[in-house]
């Protein structure tokens, strides 16, 4: 099986951003999430006139993957006009599944500006282990 490169993941995130439903912010976000089995799930942000139901691109990709039975991820690429960073809510939900995953932030020209890990973005994160009872 061919492995997905960071640049391919970024290209998938940029393509996904083109589907963003963003009448309010005009801030398009695309995400491409790489599952441990090599499958890539993409997502875009979807906004609401009521604002708070808005869902970020990262969580769109994640819920697509979870609903297809995937539970482990090795990387996520996020594309925005300014290579913006995943929000706190997205960090938390991604952390639920794969704290060590790599996080790649890129602009819409495909320039990778930051490569880090979810653990680094959410230090001392709260996760499933906290709710385990002995
Ligand atoms: N947004 C994302 O899709 N991902 C993030 O991590 C940050 C914010 C979206 C939500 C909203 O549609 C727009 O960007 C502006 O906040």
Image: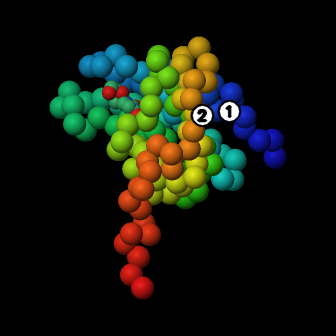
Judged left or right of residue 52, residue 59 is: right
How far apart marks 1 and 2 lie (CA) works out to 9 Å
Q: Residue 24 appears in which quarter of the rendering? A: top left
Viewer-proximal residue among 16 and 78: 78
Is residue 41 visible in the rendered structure shown here?
no
Label whose residue precedes the other's in the sequence (1 or 2)? 1
Residue farthest to the right, as pictured: 1
Residue at point 46%, 43% (across, down): 121
Instruction: Locate the C terminus by quadrant.
Output: bottom left
Mark 2 secondary-structure assignment: strand
Residue farthest to the bottom, as pictured: 134
Task: Look at the image and name its color scheme.
Answer: rainbow
Q: Is mark 1 within 8 Å of ligand 1?
A: no
Quadrant in which ligand 1 is drawn: top left
Residue 86 place in picture, x, y as percent: 43, 35
Identify residue for label 2.
Answer: 115
Are circles 1 and 2 on residues that touch, CB within 8 Å?
A: yes
Check disc 1: other Cα within 10 Å, few if <14, some if 14-19, many if 20+.
some
Residue 76 place in picture, x, y as percent: 56, 40
Identify residue for label 1.
Answer: 6
Is residue 130 visible in the rendered structure shown here?
yes
Q: Residue 77 appears in which quarter of the rendering? A: top right
Residue at point 38%, 37% (across, down): 87
In the picture, the disc for residue 63 is none
Judged left or right of residue 39, residue 48 is: left
Check disc 2: other Cα within 10 Å, few if <14, some if 14-19, many if 20+.
some
Residue at point 49%, 23% (across, down): 83
Residue at point 45%, 31% (across, down): 85
Mark 1 secondary-structure assignment: helix
Residue farthest to the left, as pictured: 50
Tell me: residue 81, above or below residue 104: above
Tell me: residue 132, above or below residue 39: below
């Amino acid at each position: 099986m061919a492995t997905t490169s960071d640049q391919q993941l970024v290209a998938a995130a940029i393509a996904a951003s083109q589907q963003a439903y963003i009448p309010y912010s005009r801030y398009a976000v695309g995400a491409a999430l790489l599952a441990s089995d090599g499958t890539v799930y993409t997502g875009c942000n979807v906004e609401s006139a009521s604002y708070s139901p808005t869902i970020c691109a990262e969580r769109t990709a994640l819920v697509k993957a979870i609903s297809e039975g995937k539970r482990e991820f090795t990387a996520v690429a996020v594309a925005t006009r300014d290579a913006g960073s995943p929000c706190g809510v997205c960090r938390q939900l991604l952390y639920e599944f794969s704290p060590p995953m790599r996080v790649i932030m890129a602009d819409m020209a495909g320039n990778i500006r930051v490569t880090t890990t979810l653990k680094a973005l959410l230090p001392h994160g709260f996760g499933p282990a906290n709710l385990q009872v002995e």
